Amino acid sequence: MTRRTSPLFVAAGLVTVLALTGCGQAGQGTTTGEDGRTQLTMWTHSAGNAAELEVYERIISDYNASQDEYEVVHESFPQGAYNDAIVAAAASGDLPCLLDLDGPIMPNWAWAQYLQPLGISSEITDSLLPTAVGKWDGEIYSAGYWDAALSIFARKSVLEGNGIRIPSTDQPWTKDEFDSALATLKDAGYDTPIDIGAEDTGEWWPYAYSPLLQSFGGDLIDRDTMLSADGSLNGDAAVAWGTWFQELFDKGYASNAGTVGNQEFVDDEVALSYTGVWNALASVEAIGDDLLILPPPDFGNGPKIGGGSWQWAISSSCNDAEGARDYLEFSFNDEYITEFADKQIVIPATEAAAQASKYFGDDGVLRPFVELSQKYAVLRPETPAYAVISTTFETAAKNIMSGADVKSTLDQAVTDIDANIASNDGYGFQ
Amino acid sequence: MTVTPPTVAAETPRRALHRLRTSRGRQAWAGWGMIAPAAILLLLFLVIPVILAFTLSFTNARLISPNPPRFVGVDNFIRAFTADPVFVQSIGNTALFALVVVPVQAGLGLALAVLVNRRLRGTTFFRVVFFIPVVTSIVVVSILWKFLYREDGLVNSMIDAVTFGLWSGTDWLNDPSTALGAIIVMSIWQAVGFHMIIWLSGLQTIPEELYEAARMDGASPWRQFTNVTWPGLRPTMVFVLVTITIAALGLFVQIDVMTQGGPQGATSTIVFHAVRKGYEQQEIGYAAAISLIFFVAVLIIALIQRRLTREKD
């Protein structure tokens, strides 16, 4: 090569490099490991969650050791970036065989044909909590090892000291009782008597506050048709919820300052905390026998708790669905489910695993959560429109929190949701 | 694969080689070769996305959907202006942000640059101090300021201390009347150092002799500034104005980290709204339409700016 022609070759080289990087990501199909086993790729959202990853690593190494046909290879993403990674991977045809997903997003992905019916033994799915099994269009597409539940944490001494009735699962607080309890606690010197976690953002908002709306008698969407939110999200019940929610902040009962998590309650800066099972053990350890795990108040239609947590699914592009099913069936072992529950402090999805658990068995300190979940759990609407419903509800609830007119805010939310459903030809519901 | 006829195969490279050997041809090839990297990158990351956005904005394409996108004409544009109050609000917010940030940030940057351009001891120290927020990630800055702006945050503690408790601040980011203002203040503070450096480089291109002559003519420092410094800074000014305007119109990260467009849409911007619609709510077609509107708006503003700041001979 002469010196003069070199720019041409450099340019040609660059073009090649660019072309290669452009398509270097394609084709994460079946690959074979060094020992000839078929590799099953698996993605989890658990990067940063050491307790959860530890159990996954144990299951995977147990499974790989038991196998000469398949080998599971996993990769972890931080939760914040996980859904984006899945959508991007799906768009470029790079989905892994096994992936975990947040329960309410499943119908969207199943509808988009990212997922194939789970197809694992019905013996397993039948034994799971109903909220740990994801169904769409009459088929099971996902299943999980655990569920989560929200409750109200309180100190026995504080409630008794202020003459507030301690509610039970059979007799939860009524709306009036709850409101007067908040007023009493405010007078007792708590700056904001309840921490409802309003400083958090994202899926927490529909997860935590739409059950309150449902307890008032409203809902995110008309679940009979799944075609419109009109009347559910802006009816009288929903407006009553919005007004109550706004007053919570107006009257200084709750605030959206503070830190995500349960620290304010542990430090006794707030008297009540509306928070999840995952914060329970730390509170038990800090507060001991004085801690009460109470059902959410009954605003007219019974207490409600959001159901559905992270679950596992098989992608539609998986070439070795048989292997993926084999792995999942292997992993739904009560022993592993117990380990997830005890390490991560989440409600085990099978009764046998609950009984074997340190915390969720009949005498366990966190047993109330199992009952709360069984009695009050409501799934978020199982429709592909959920991605829109969820973000629209979050925006609307935040606007209501900061003082917007309740009725017109909810009307706008309904308009947005309905326009989206219409532009998607009803997402398959017609 | 079939074998290509040997005659053609042998002829083509020979002809190409021939062209390579002539010196004109060599030059042309070298030229193309040197353009290639930039051209390919521009094509890949600028031209193709713009064409895609343009096409998508006339469809109801979704990020995730089994349904094929359908041509919907100008529906998306009509929807943006008539049925999406948050979009209209976002235009207002973005415009207000730019209208405040452009002059204030440019002016403040110039003032700081003149200050640190003095031959005094410790100017390097001040240059570093003013520049630190620029090199700090905007995400980190936003998170820190979110804490500062809280009801029990440092800003309110300071107001409390300075006014001896007479006036207590509000919850800045949660009050629709103060949220955008709070973000404007923070954004100006964050990027002013960058523009200070640009102004500074402009200041240092002005020959010292001009000042010397001005001083000999008895010009006051203000006359020196208006008659020597300012005319000498003209090209710098154009650059600073254009960069601030474009950065201000593209406001996104601060909003995403600090307020998510709230409260009540008071801080929603066009880019934020496009990302929310396109990514969170998966309406790529609609988001593309918003982006296209944004693109046209920026183009018009840039053209106006160019016209206003052009060299008048």
Image: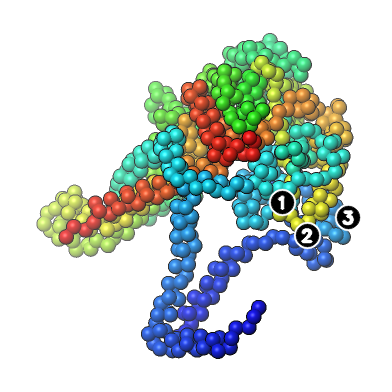
As drawn, is A201 to the left or to the right of A11?
right
Q: Which callout, 3 or 1, points at the residue further toward the start of the chain?
A: 3
- Chain under label 3? A
Asked whether residue B4 is in view, the answer is yes
Measuring 62% from the left and 56% from the top, which residue is drawn there?
A92
Q: Residues within 10 Å of mark 3 (few under 14, many from 20)?
A: few
The percent position of residue B190, horizontal first and vertical second, equals 42, 46
Measuring 81% from the left and 47% from the top, which residue is drawn there?
A328
Q: Which residue is mark 3?
A: A66
**Which of the labelled discs sits on residue B126, or is there none?**
none
Q: In the image, what residue type sits under mark 1?
A: Ser
Q: Residues within 10 Å of mark 1 (few under 14, many from 20)?
A: some
Q: Looking at the image, which is closer to me, B230 or B8?
A: B8
Q: Circle 1 sits in a helix, a strand or a loop, which is it?
A: loop
Q: Which callout, 2 or 1, points at the residue further toward the start of the chain?
A: 2
Task: Give the Cα separation between the discs numbered 2 and 1.
Answer: 16 Å
The percent position of residue B121, horizontal first and vertical second, equals 33, 54
**Which of the labelled discs sits on residue A316, or is there none?**
1
Measuring 59% from the left and 14% from the top, which residue is drawn there?
A183
- Chain under label 2? A
Q: Which residue is mark 2?
A: A39
Task: Give the Cα separation between the discs numbered 3 and 1.
Answer: 26 Å
